[in-house]
Image (spheres, coloured by chain):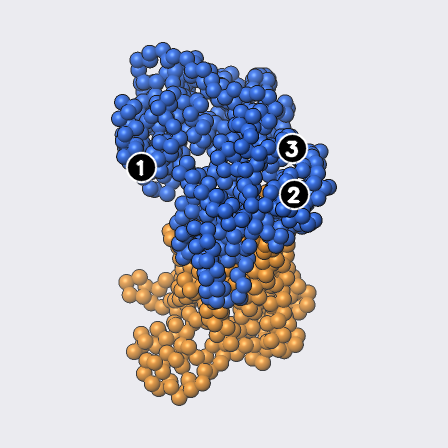
Chain colours: A blue, B orange
Amino acid sequence: MKPAIETREISKRFGAVQANDQISLVVDKGSVHGIVGENGAGKSTLLKMLFGFYTPNSGDILVDGEHCRFSNPTDAMSAGIAMVHQHFMLVEPFTVLENIILGAEGAGLLKRACAEASVKIKKLEEEFGFNLPLDTPVSHLSVGERQRVEILKALYRGAETLILDEPTAVLTPQECDQLFALINVLKSQGKTVLFVTHKLHEIIAVTDAVTVIRGGKVITRMATSETTPDQLAEAMVGAKITRAVEAEDRGGAAQARLRLTNVCALSDMGHAALDSISFELYDGEVLGVAGVAGNGQTELLEVLSGMRRVTDGEVTISGKVTNTSDHMYDPIMLRDMGLAHIAEDRLKTGVVSSMTGRENAVLGYQRTNDFSKGGLLKLNAIADAADTYYETQDVRPRDPDLPLEALSGGNQQKLVIAREIARDPEIMVIGQPTRGVDIGAVTKIHDQIIALRNQGKALLVVSADLDELMVVSDRIAVMCDGKLAGIVPVDQADERTLGLMMAGDASTAEQQTQASV
Amino acid sequence: MEFLTDLVLLSNSTLRVATPLLLAALAGLCSERAGIVDIGLEGKMLAAAFAAASAAAVTGSPWAGLLAGIMASVLLALIHGYVSINQRGNQIVSGMAINILVAGLAPTLANAWFSRGGQTPLLGNEARFTEITLPLADTLSSVPVIGDVYSNVLSGHSMLTYVAFASVPVVAWVLYKTRFGLRLRAVGENPEAVETAGISVVLLRYQAMIIAGILCGIAGSSLSTALGAGFIRDMSAGKGYLALAAMIFGRWKPVPTLLACLLFAFVDALQGRLQGVELPLIGEIPVQFTIMLPYILTVVILAGFAGKMDAPKASGIPYEKNR
């Protein structure tokens, strides 16, 4: 049988960067094929060529054994290739039905188009086991449901091959299981799935074969049954990496560094975002905070870092009450107390991306005597500090005069980390430590978090990545709907129970909380 | 009885005043629903008013005037489109540039062509859209209430007024009941979704620009060839901004926008009636204050009621394909 998709030595160059270098890929028909690689390995470029967003500089793309040239996504679509993007291509106020037919409406009048389409969609739903509310606006759907809308949309357009770009990045573990089940149904109905991820256990779980890409080149192609996550990780990164870091015993800290007592806060929209949250964080400990995005983690970070006032309860840091409904320490006062904050949304609150690396290196500390005097900046001291940060964290390119937007996300994050730990803080509040950071740098950031903990710092880490929390945390707190669903010591935690707690399964949450007492 | 007469007159002038406002607001609506902020309504309207008055003065035909008005407005809309869509420029800056350009250019051209101090010649009735008496209006006028409303409020407007009100259901139908409307609304919310669905964002937005240009062109033409009889410097008098405010207050939806336009028009008509009228307790309100009424209303409405919530999400954001 001819492969569903075959590429022969396709290359793509952007200016001086060779994003894809003679990539040859064979995806068997009716199989689930995985593509793994670090951020920046060239996965996205490859995908974009496969669904017609970019045209290759050289090489051939074959679909069902026939040469194809795609000049836009419509061409790829008519060859039966559809992409399910990581950021959903959905119009939120539109209903599921309207989203599915957009661009493939058929009739010029919507009434007729919808009537015709819903018959066809019902049939597809039956065939593939979907159950989506067609007349509900997409904005009312959960992330998992939206992803299914995207997949149904592709099937409606007659897709034979579906490209899923990091499909699990936004899902809870339960939603992931549903997705995997759906992928199996698609496969059993003869569809081909190209599954792109950087999570290796997912590759093992759903794919039949896997291609590893590094530095724009294919490193290896293996049958999934004949490989292991370690092997894949090694192929991906190029050197053996050890992820687990030895934890040291915590010295018996007497007083909590951070204490939250019945903290409540409102979101920007005025809804209750934090609902009576209480916990303690001790020196020499990493408390991980897990949860599906939008369950109060952002507000928690803001409450701790002096950016959002609580409506009830209090936050105590190093014995001082820093946030109550009538007064709040601002970020400057908190910094002076030894609180460092690595912002969740780097570009919004962590850096000013149009300013140079040097300026960003002291941002937030520019008032301190080290960096200014009488309102004038000490430029030499700032330059020295920036050079040191670039050196110790290996920030690349090593040119502090470049605006920060010229750096990759990982390098920006390295600079932020250097800046925040330079003051030797007592307590660190970290949001999404490795968001947009490539896997080599991820390990280094994890090592640093654990090193800080071993130095006796108190760290709170909010992350959407459960694997990450399992690596760095001593205890993991799970947030669901603004409440603390429970705190689990890491040695008793596994993804399944954490996932259930994230999804608001009360009985499991209770059980886990009791277990942790 | 006098109160009733007042009310009838007030309603009649509300409809008159609402004509350019409504057309311009619908123009803005089509544009913003497609994701392009249209603060240049004012300038397009003024340009259309000038072009229509000039063409009507030269040819003696209001239809030639209307055509010229529409062409002028569409031309400016396309310039705005080129800046916003192809060059991904700042849409507010581009719109304001159009407003400023026209405010200066129209009187200058008028002066050069007609040498009347920045005005166009006064148009005779044959070169204007004159009042139409609806069928049976004279016969029915004696019927109390219904006949009164029909013959004195609804009848006796220019054709463009009827066009304006008819375009509300037409725009609503196109927007909500047709494939084109679905795509137009989609491109204002999430252009990437439209592009990946295989539809050209650029083409769709240009189509929206042209529709907005046509509607705004009719609005401007109505100023100088239906409500007025010639072009006067600054004759749009902020109506483009009022229309934008009405559209925002109408939450980017045709029927609520119609109601908002009627409210603005009513206040405008009311201020006309209030001039020189002795009110109980207050006495006569100085004309400077009555003229302010519609603008004060705009400020109050925009500051107090209008939310950003309902705005099309992609409105005002340049769309770049290779992000």
How many discs appear? 3
Q: Which mark is residue A218?
A: 3
On the question of residue B225 being in view, the answer is yes
Disc 2 residue type?
Glu
Going by the image, does A326 lie left or right of A405? left
Relative to B277, residue A273 above or below = above
Q: Judging from the image, what secondary structure is the residue with disc 2 in?
A: strand
Q: Judging from the image, what secondary structure is the residue with disc 1 in?
A: loop
Cβ atoms under marks 1 and 2 closer than 8 Å: no
Q: Earlier in the sequence, mark 1 or mark 2?
A: 2
Disc 1 residue type?
Asp
Look at 53% across and 37% down and name the residue there: A207
Residue A335 % position (x, y) = 42, 22
Instruction: Tell which of B277 and A140 is nearer to you.
Output: A140
Crowding at dot 2, Cα within 10 Å, few <14 / some 14-19 / many 20+, comes out as: many
Look at 37% across and 23% down and name the residue there: A490
Residue tagged by mark 2?
A: A6
Relative to A73, residue A333 above or below = above
